[in-house]
Amino acid sequence: MSRSLALMRYPMSSFRCVFAASLMMTLLASGCQKKTEAPVTEEPKTTEKPKAPAAPKAAPAYPTRAFFGDTHVHTSLSLDAGMFGATTTPEDAYRFARGEEVTASKGLKAKLKKPLDFLVVADHAENLGFFKLLKSGDPKVLANPKGKEWYEGFKKGGQDAVAATLDFIETFAQGKFPKELELEGEETRPLWEEMIAAAEKYNAPGTFTAFAGYEWTSMPGSMNLHRVVIFVDGPDRTRQIVPFSAYDSDDPEKLWDALAAYEKKTGGRVLAIAHNGNLSNGVMFVLETQGGEPFDKAYAQRRIRYEPLYEVTQMKGDGEAHPFLSPDDEFADFENWDVGNLDLSQAKKNSMLAGEYAREALKRGLALGNKLGANPFKFGMIGSTDTHTGLATADDDTFFGKHSGLEPNDERAKNLFHEGKGGKLYGWQQVASGYAAVWATENTRKALFEAMERKEVYATTGPRMTVRLFGGWDFTDADLSGDFVKAGYERGVPMGGDLTPAQGKSAPTFVVAAMKEADGANLDRVQIVKGWVDAKGKTHEKVYDVAWSDDRKPDKKGKVPAVGNTVKVAKCSYKNSIGAKELIKVWTDPDFDAGQTAFYYVRVLEIPTPRWTCYDVKRYGAKLPKKAPMTTQERAYSSPIWYTPR
């Protein structure tokens, strides 16, 4: 293999105007005007004084562009990333995201073909910088038996290093990390200062946004309760604190206390994003506090105040839906990691799944909102990678792997990823996912952060497709022939918003629109996922096919047939001979009940494309088990729009 691996797809080419001044105006912000060719004529002679040029039009007050980024990237400063062999620094991560070439940990040259718009380096707060001490053979580390064991295993390399790394991570996950080796509080300040400095150095308002942040790595009983913490502020504020770690407390409420204290002390602003919960064994969305108390209104209000977003998809699995919870959804079985908890020390039980997946959590939130007067799970949805290589990559054709030991090579897909009492995970089960898309007025910390706060965001499993959702009471097909984005903001609410009852209106209407990535795969369909609570307090869900490509007809149950599959596995190729470049629709809820609390979000599916495992087989001749999938169907999930009766 070449020592150079260029990543992502080629730069976006200009789009053609497909709808008469409507879809492009919406999806690409200011719209595209239909051009006509005028005959060339001689300019008439005139003695009139030329008119002054018209004043430039004011920029719209609403967001006109989706910015794509990654809120969850680890570098060698994270204890686990370092143990797995990462050499990348926070500066490397920001440079790479901005489109610069960097050297990956295993020596490959890597460069994004299409830069990201923003990035958060979110190294683990716990033992921040510990790997530097371990690698250097610090006397403090070698004086501890466990520390010496890890050091010697890491130095030997190969399987000894892998064994040392897994033992290191399991020791930490199970709360058995030697107390005398813990790094916390002020001991982590030098590394926190390094992270802040890197974000400040590479932040370029209007061009690229670098946020300061970290990951709070709570995992009681090895159940994943991690949160990524993001600051909108610069170093004048962020340097006034050090990261709050699980050593301080593994209770999310204590994290919120720390975030509130930061805001009070500095006048700054901060939010947290819950890590996707499929390795939490049902704990991420339980219905009681960590202390075993039932939720109350104050708890619900604090949770959604500090955790407005949820990471629904990433390299360790997709967390939108699960077939056990959604048996009528033929697309629910997508890259589910449902084996066990974080270190696989406990097996997964079906009874745990409801506390892990976004759709079920949103439904639980509706019921809790009716009961408490506040919804603790009223979150928007984003994707991010959780890469431990420092390289924010989420495309199947250039997938760089979860950690540095899984960077492109001929063994990574077939090797064991992790094993425990709960089960096994293999390299081929990694997911090339995901990115966060943010609708903002400009590419700055303030604008992006405010969009995250209001949940005007969506998740994508990698492709940079464009997705719009507006909810209102009087949208019609006529809106699609004009600037429906403007109409959406003026007469409705965007994704992340609240739809309030309207006098005399029988059912809400929604404008849904999606456009393929310019050089990516065509779209299969656009769906609306609805959840609601009936009069008895029971939750329900339904998936509606709203717009789809080609000439397919729904069956008697309203299901649209599969789009087909053009993938040639031997060549890892596909054709855009099926599917659509864009899909747009005004949809009215046919089952609306004005007395029922509900949410609506959009799911967009691409046509099938080659999965990263297919590319590994082609490049290396890798031998994979038959159950390893060779194709995938990439997708995006919008944040919901909520409806609450008066």
Image (cartoon, grey):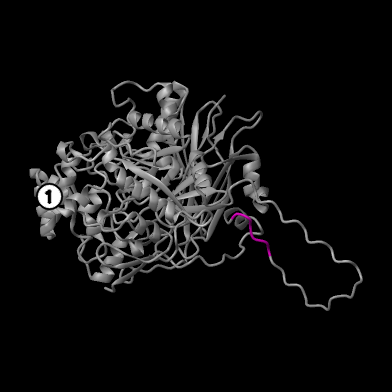
Q: Is residue 393 visible?
A: no
Which residue does the image show at 68% across and 52% down from the upper left? 482
- Judge from the rendering whether residue 364 lies leftward or rightward of residue 156; answer left or right: right
- Judge from the rendering whether residue 147 lies leftward or rightward of residue 186; answer left or right: left
At mark 1, the secondary structure is helix
**Mark 1, residues whose alpha carbon is within 10 Å: few (<14), some, or many (≥20)?**
many
Question: Residue flagged by tag 1: what amino acid is it?
Answer: Trp
- Judge from the rendering whether residue 14 lies leftward or rightward of residue 40; answer left or right: left
Residue 402: percent from left, percent from top: 28, 55
Above-or-below relation of 22 to 359: below
Q: Is residue 634 visible?
A: yes
Which residue does the image show at 67% across and 61% down from the upper left? 33
Q: Nearer the viewer, residue 67 or 349?
A: 67
Q: Quadrant of the C terminus?
A: top right
Give the overall secondary structure of the magenta segment.
loop
The answer to which image quadrant residue 391 occupies is bottom left
Residue 122: percent from left, percent from top: 35, 47
The answer to which image quadrant residue 615 occupies is bottom left
Above-or-below relation of 202 to 348: below
Above-or-below relation of 46 to 120: below
Which residue was labeled with disc 1?
150
Q: What segment carries the magenta color?
A: 29-34
Q: Nearer the viewer, residue 54 or 617?
A: 54
Q: Nearer the viewer, residue 421 or 12?
A: 12
Q: Nearer the viewer, residue 484 or 303?
A: 303
Residue 326: percent from left, percent from top: 36, 40
Which residue does the image show at 19% across and 41% down from the upper left? 172
Q: Is residue 263 magenta?
A: no
- Judge from the rendering whether residue 548 lies leftward or rightward of residue 150; answer left or right: right
Q: Is residue 31 magenta?
A: yes
